[in-house]
Image (cartoon, grey):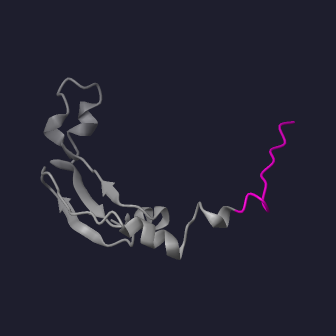
Amino acid sequence: MKVQHIAIEGKCFFINTDMIIRRSSYPSDLQEYNIVSKLPGLVCRGGSCIIDSYGHYLTKPVWDKETIIYAELDMNLPAACKMEHDAIGHYACPDVLELKVNEK
């Protein structure tokens, strides 16, 4: 799982919340249950984690179980990252660039 790019590009903390889905979670009277019954016991393994704005894991991804994850966040870190590269800040150059849409 590579989700660090979300935190790096956004220069923000990224809290990745992935779910655990078990085959037993599906109701047996589901119209497509014949398809569901062929799925593995653990359909979606999770992978929840917290990533800082440099792309470093503050918590490792949690697989195959439900849990609550915690991390200490340095709220100065995103601002420091934006000093290096601010994707929506001064690079946007609204005085130089303009988007026009031809609606014909």
Residue 40 in view of the camera: no
Q: Is residue 96 above or below residue 54?
A: above
Q: Which residues are magenta?
A: 93-104
Q: On the image, which quarter does residue 93 sit in? A: bottom right
Q: Position of residue 94 (x, y in %)?
A: 73, 57
Instruction: Pick the residue in front: 77 or 19.
Output: 77
* Residue drawn at (12%, 51%) of the image: 67
On screen, residue 58 versus residue 54, left or right, reads left
* Residue drawn at (18%, 41%) of the image: 23
| Secondary structure mostly taken by the magenta-highlighted segment of the chain | loop
Q: Position of residue 69 (x, y in %)?
A: 17, 56
* Residue drawn at (17%, 58%) of the image: 70
Q: On the image, which quarter does residue 79 sit in? A: bottom left
Q: Position of residue 22 (x, y in %)?
A: 17, 43
Q: Position of residue 62 (x, y in %)?
A: 18, 60
Q: Is residue 69 above or below residue 41?
A: below
The number of callouts visible is 0
* Residue drawn at (36%, 61%) of the image: 13
**Where is the C terminus found, in terms of image quarters?**
top right
Instruction: Pick the residue in front: 84 or 76.
Output: 76
Residue 73 in view of the camera: yes
**Farthest front residue?**
76
Instruction: Pick the residue in front: 90 or 70.
Output: 90
**Where is the N terminus found, in terms of image quarters?**
bottom left
Q: Is residue 26 magenta?
A: no
On screen, residue 29 versus residue 88, left or right, reads left
**Farthest bottom residue?**
84
On screen, residue 82 versus residue 89, left or right, reads left
